[in-house]
Each structure stands twice: as structure tokens, then as C-alpha cells.
Image: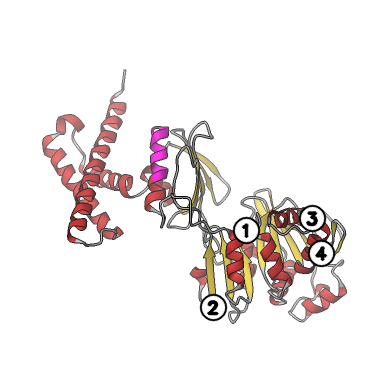
Amino acid sequence: MRTSREEGERARTRLVDELSRSIGAALADRQLESSRTGMSSHMTSSEHGVAMLAAKNELDRFRTASLTTFGLIPHAEEETLVNEAVSQVLGLGRLDPLLSNEDVSDIHVRGPHPVWLKYRDGRREQVDPIVDSDAELIELIRRAATRLTRTERRFDIGHPELNLQLPDGSRMFATMDVSTHPTMVIRRHKFDNASLNDLMRLGMFSEQVGSFLAAAVRARRNIVIAGGTGSGKTTLLRALMNEVPPSERIVTIEDAYELGIDKFAHLHPDHDALQSRQANIEGSGEIDLAALTRMALRMDPDRVIVGEVRGAEAFPMILAMSQGNNGSMCTMHADSTRSVFPKLAAYVSMAPSGLPTETVNLLLASALHFVVHIEVADSKRRISSIREVVDADGNSIVSNEVVSQSSRVEPFASLRAATAEMLADYGFDARRWSL
């Protein structure tokens, strides 16, 4: 037997659905009227006003004519019902309140099951489902792909994955058919303008390491930042970018605008931000990171910053680093500084270069200067290793680990003399500091 609470929830859901249908009809009428008069109908603010008015009018009608169907509607509940219906049509339904919570960093949705949230302080929490069926989640994802992107994107059995950026900068990845339930994972990026000093105070590294990183950027050393998912690679990359003099021109290359260089234009007034693009619904128009990297090199950059390297774009990036674009930086997934080298070699081999391994390693050794690895230990991010690239020896890259959390060797004791002299000119003297 259904309880009165269950009956009330069902009635509330039916009411929101009715309001949503009224909003849809009003927007369709507006679209027809715009087509007839030749006026544009894509003003988001105007759409929102039409939706709010339609929902309120429909709610007034229900209040007087349909009390037996939906029961008495408390006045305090009316605004919530209207906003929920508008969000269901124009926004992302019950997902919107989760996206508005600034403390949430990740959202994991699996069909009509409870949603898992990850918070920026490391907490995890399970909350109520945001959809009532698999079909409803698929429809929500398709609505996001249609309304929140510049080009229409497919999400169906023939194309069971979707990767897109939401207007607030969050990254959405969704799958269907290949999983037991349609799934959606949202990673929310907080565009904090953290400096190296800020990260030092948070315990990511010591003052000595912070001084070294600042000098390495000013000395135009090419740096790779490695680590696992959520380890803080992008956060550290933003902080390093802030050490670049404002007179230098930066071109960023990303799958999504996670670096947020446009948000801090006062620090980097001469910049361009490039973002990859997936194919449209007809299967054309794709622009990958490798193509963007080639474009960036024609845009007269002082430095090229790649948000994350994970494929054939490694080849043009390494070429750029070895041909005069010193001071370039990137991030990549790797479990140590040492494992960066074979992964980069594998990425370069994805490009149609046909270079033998020995040649690739020579190229890597001539292009890279430092590799930094970040790990998460006891829920805290920290730099666990910094490695200086020295040379190539056949199938191997020769390098020195100049910082290690697992070693008692004095930090920077293995730094080459020529490198130490260069960095001293930019403010870093290893002999002055101690961990």
C-alpha cells in the first residue's frame, strides 16, 4: 500500500511534468512565431522569461481547476515547482542543484541509482537519484548535448559516448549501451588563481622546491607535470604559468578550457586559448590536439602550454620544445617521473613519423628539461619527485632524480653544475635552502 508521502511525491512529479509540457509548448509556439516573423529565437534570457511565465500561468490554472488531481499547492512550494520545471526543460533538471554547489568537485551518476558526490575536501557522499529511469538520464544527456554546445552532438547506440564542456567549465563524460546503465561523470574545475606560494602553504612542496620551480619557469625550462587523476597537475600548471612574465605570448592547447587563461588575462595579456573539437552529427569537423599543436606553432608563441598530453599531439609538442619554444609545459598521467619517458615515447609513436626508438629518445632528451610528479598521500597533494633529463642512451633516457620524498639524499645534490649555474641567475641557489 502506498503511503500518503509516496502519493504526494507522485503528485508533485506529475505536476512538474505538466508544467514542463506547458513550457515546451510555449517555447515551440515562440519558435514558430519567430520563424514566421524572421526574428531570432536563440536568446537564452528571453527563453527563460517565456518559460517562467508559461509555468506560472499553468500553475495558476492548476490552482483553480485541478486541485482534486494535484492537491492543494502550498504557496511556499510554488517557486520551487516553477524553477524545477524550467530547469527540467532549459537546464539539467535535478542535476542543476548539484552543479550549483561550489564544494562539489565530482558527480557520478549511474542510471536511476543514488548519485555519488566527491567534495573538494576529500569527502564522499551518496545523495538521491536525479532521474527515475535509464531513459530519463539518456534524455538529460542528449538535452545537454543539444542545448549546451555550439554544435549538435550524437549520443545513441551508434555513438555511445559523449564528451563535452558545460557552460560553467565543468567536464561531462557519458556512456550508454556499453554499460549496464547509462552513466554520466562530471568533473568540476575550480579556476583558482593559485600561486606557487599558495601551494607551498598548502603543503604541496617546500619553500626550496617552490624557489626551484619559479626559477625553472623563468629560465625557460621545458617541464612535464605528471601524476594521477585529481592529484593537482592542472593546479600546479596554472601556478607555474603565473611565473611567466606578462610580456611573453602564451598559446594554450586543451581538450577543455581547464587552465582558464582567459580568466586571468591581466597576468597574460598576450595569449590565445585553443580547444579541440569533436566531429559533428554528420561525422565531420573534428579537430584534435595534434592539429591544434601544429596551429599553435604558427601563432608566434613564446611558450606553448598543453593541458594534457595523451596521444599523437606529443610529437609536434616535442618538436616545438626542441626547436626553440623553450619554456613550454604540459601535464600527463603517469605513476612516477621515470615512467613519463616510455609513455611519451609511446605517444610519439602514435604519430605517423615512423621514427625508431633511439631517435625518439634523442628527441625527448633534447626537448625535455624537468619532469615533476605529484601524488596524493593521506588526502594531501605533494610533489613526490623531480627529475632532470640529462641525455639519451639507446632505448633509455638518462636522468637524475633531484628531489625525492622517498630518499634522504639532500635535495638538488644531483643537479648538474651547468643547470645549477643557470638557475642561480634566475633566483635559485640550492646551497641557500634546506627542506
Q: Are marks 3 and 2 in contact (CB under 8 Å)?
A: no
- Give the amino acid type for the residue marked by disc 4 in the picture: Leu
Q: CA distance from mark 1 to mark 4?
A: 22 Å
Which of the marked residues, 4 or 3, is nearer the chain's N terminus? Answer: 3
Specify the principal SS of the magenta part: helix
Q: Quadrant of the N terminus?
A: top left
Q: Which residues are magenta?
A: 132-142
Question: To which residue does mark 2 refer?
Answer: 270
Q: Residue at x 70, y 74 (%)?
A: 326
Mark 2–mark 1 distance (CA, rounded to whole Å): 22 Å
Q: Is residue 51 left or right of residue 103?
A: left
- Disc 2 is placed on an element classified as loop
Q: Is residue 403 magenta?
A: no
Residue 403 visible to the viewer:
no
Amino acid type of the residue that numbered disc 1 sits on in the rendered structure: Glu
Disc 1: CA contacts within 10 A as few (<14), some (14-19) or many (>=20): many
- Ranked by sequence position, the earlier of labels 3 and 1 is 1
Front residue (pair 171, 430): 171
Residue topped by disc 4: 362
Determine whether the residue tagged by mark 3 lies in a helix, strand or loop: loop
In-front residue for pair 138/154: 154
Q: Amino acid at mark 2?
A: Asp
**Location of residue 389 with respect to 28 vertically, above or below:** below
Identify the residue under disc 3.
Answer: 338
Q: Which residue is mark 1?
A: 308
Say above or below: 405 vs 9: below
Up-down relation of residue 368 to residue 95 (above or below): below
In this image, 17 relative to 97: left or right?
Answer: left
